[in-house]
Amino acid sequence: MQDDKTEDPSSPGLDLSAEIGEDGVKLKSSTPAVADDVLPDSLYLIPVPQRPFFPGQVQPVGMDPDEWAGTIKAVTETSNSVVGLAYVDPSQLNGGDPQPRDFPEIGCVVRLHRPPMMAENPGQFLAQGVRRFRIVRWLSDKPPYRVQVEYPRSQGDRDSDDVKAYSMAVLQAVKELLPLNPLYSEELRHYIANFNPNQPSLLADFSAALTTAKGDQLQEILETLPLQSRMQKVLTLLGKEREVAELRGKITEQVNEKVSDQQREFFLREQMKVIQKELGLSKDDRTSDAERFEARLESLILPDAVRERIDDELQKLSVLEPGSPEYGVTRNYLDWATQVPWGLSSEDNLDLKHAATVLDQDHDGLDDVKDRILEFLAVGSFKGEIAGSILLLVGPPGVGKTSIGRSVANALGREFYRFSLGGMRDEAEIKGHRRTYVGAMPGKFVQALKEVKVANPVIMLDEIDKIGASFRGDPASALLEVLDPEQNSEFLDHYLDLRVDLSKVLFICTANQLDTIPGPLLDRMETLRLSGYVAEEKLAIARNHLWPKQLERHGLSADQLKIMIPH
């Protein structure tokens, strides 16, 4: 059986307006208490699993009606309607019915005031604790349990000075608990105010029932018959209860202070926003976002399709609530769409002498590669723009493939952006995610255009020979559209869902070998091989490039350290 949910371990569960005697209780309805001379010599027994019942306690008790219906029926058929309640720890049982050895020697006899058969809830009855009983002999060790009992009295002189002193100490401890626990009602305060010092036994039991102590600790109080010893144990429990209540109060106070500070800050910020808006010093988030996006568009040259799409999204933003998830999705989309450099290009420096000077300053040797790059730039100079071809620099690691790409960007006066394709296995890295996905972002090329803020940068694709494929798609196939001059003028990014012109971008790719590059992708690129350097070129590289970098890295000047090279 289980106690009913209405039984709160922090609640005393007492009818505090009742007239309480030393060994019995008289209810407000003037129902006579069960006197000692009419208590039966034998009792039906019901185990309670969570807390023992105390004399003077009046509260509902829950039970399993299917298991204990026979016991309750037998009790209600008797003339006095009393039953014994004994605490049995359910953790000590093996899942079956409790055995006589599982019951304690002392329990509490209670009177039934609302038999389960007559109540709306057959699994609950109202019990009034009368007094302690001690089991003398078992008459039935199977449900319904029946035992022969005796009724021990409290031991000690209740009129002695020691008992009265303990009574006042217990009463003071209970009073100290009142402001710490809001569960203690006004009836409890009324009981304490009208407490009769001649009832130390009931005071001790009443105070023990107030605490949230464990069942075995309360059972020890129930089994302690000497008044002075019982009150000592009750004082210990009340002291622990006060410490727990004070700690709970401190935790609650800290939480309330934190919540109050947050609420105060929130209200102040909201008031500040309203005041600033009324004074024309600021706008709400939605208006501020829309104006920021419109300001970005003023310097851009938008294609008609892009302008129409962005206008639609701005209109949607104006009707959405700032706190809605859709508002965040739309705002992020506009944030990306308005930072793409639509129609903005930097002017190319097509001076071939300048390009040759930059290439010679940055690299020693590689004359054949430099000549081929100058030929490529000469064709662009003749046309008036650099577009069409995709350069692929192939060679072993460390021969200067990446630095050549940066030198080409410096020679043309273009912005430079580099990212590695090594190990890339998700085609969404190239073409972007659908905006319906959580955490969706555009592809790498839209991100590159956003960072460089022009539509004609030099984008270097490193390690194109190490690109892979997985269940997320084939990035190499996604690159076909990017690196095809006939298609990349209308590259479609899945996140923006807009056509982006990549035809003005100069793509320079690097690879260590050609074997792992897919054939259709290789056909779209013009291959330049960097085989390595001869000894004289290595010496020039060390003298003109590596040595100055090492001196700068270590904070030295050229005249502080010199290396003599024998001829």
Image (cartoon, grey):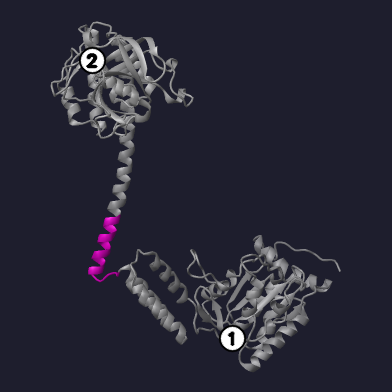
Residue 342, percent across and down?
Answer: 49, 82
Reply yes or no: does residue 137 show up in magenta: no
Dot 2 crowding, Cα within 10 Å, few <14, some 14–19, many 20+: many
Is residue 230 toward the left or the right of residue 194 in the image?
right
| Residue at point 66%, 73% (across, down) | 476
The answer to which quarter of the image holds residue 471 is: bottom right
| Placement of 30 over or under 65, stated as above or below | above
Mark 2 or mark 1, which is nearer the start of the sequence? 2
| Residue at point 20%, 12% (across, down) | 35
Residue 380, percent across and down?
Answer: 65, 89
Which residue sits furthest bottom? Answer: 382
Pointer 2: what residue?
Answer: 167
Viewer-nearest of discs 1 and 2: 2
Residue interval drawn in magenta:
266-283
Pointer 1: what residue?
Answer: 348
Residue 544, percent across and down?
Answer: 73, 72
Reply yes or no: does residue 281 show up in magenta: yes
Quadrant location of the N terminus?
top left
The answer to which quarter of the image holds residue 409 is: bottom right
Q: Main secondary structure of the magenta part?
A: helix
Q: CA distance from mark 1 to mark 2?
A: 99 Å
Give 69 or 453, whichever is nearer the viewer.
69
Look at the numbered disc 1 and give the secondary structure of its residue: loop
| Residue at point 31%, 11% (across, down) | 42
| Placement of 527 over or under 123, stated as above or below | below
| Residue at point 54%, 83% (across, down) | 346
Look at the numbered disc 2 and give the secondary structure of its residue: helix
| Placement of 205 over or under 520, stated as above or below | above
